[in-house]
């Protein structure tokens, strides 16, 4: 199932890697697509929406919409 989030605070490729790695720590097989220009993060994962939001929050970014 693909879930899309709007994420604030991402400004560079390091941010993209941090969000991707944080999600993959919760689901190693997750497919993560980040559009840095729009702040959109699409995740294809078996994890719950809340678990994915928590992973992004733990990485230091703010989910403002989606899920």
Image: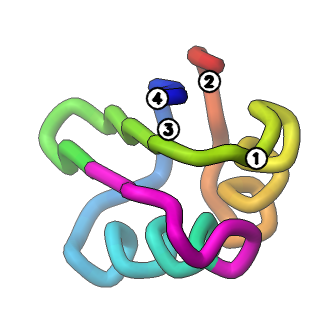
Closer to the camera: disc 1 or disc 2? 1
* Residue 35 vertical placement versus 56 (above, below): above
Residue 30 in magenta stretch = yes
Residue at image position (32%, 37%) is 39
Per the image, label 4 sits on a secondary structure element best described as strand
Q: Distance between the residues labelled 1 and 3?
A: 18 Å
Question: Which portion, as a residue range, is magenta?
Answer: 25-33
Instruction: Write down the residue under mark 2.
Output: 64
> Is residue 5 shown to the viewer in this render?
no
Residue at image position (20%, 49%) is 36
Instruction: Write down the residue under mark 4.
Output: 2
Residue 29: which disc? none
Left/right of residue 43 with respect to residue 63 in the rendered view: left
Proximity of marks 1 and 3: CB atoms separated by less than 8 Å: no
* Residue farthest to the left, as pictured: 37
Instruction: Write down the residue under mark 1.
Output: 47
Q: How far apart are marks 1 and 2 (CA)?
A: 19 Å
Proximity of marks 2 and 3: CB atoms separated by less than 8 Å: yes
Proximity of marks 1 and 2: CB atoms separated by less than 8 Å: no
Instruction: Write down the residue under mark 3.
Output: 7
Badge 3: residue crowd in 10 Å (few <14, some 14–19, many ≥20): many
């Amino acid at each position: 199932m693909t879930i899309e989030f709007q994420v604030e605070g991402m400004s560079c490729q390091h941010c993209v890697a941090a969000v991707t790695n944080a999600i993959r720590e919760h689901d190693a097989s997750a497919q993560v697509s980040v559009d840095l220009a729009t702040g959109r993060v699409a995740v294809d994962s078996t994890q719950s929406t809340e678990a994915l939001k928590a992973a992004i929050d733990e990485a230091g970014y703010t989910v403002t919409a989606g899920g």
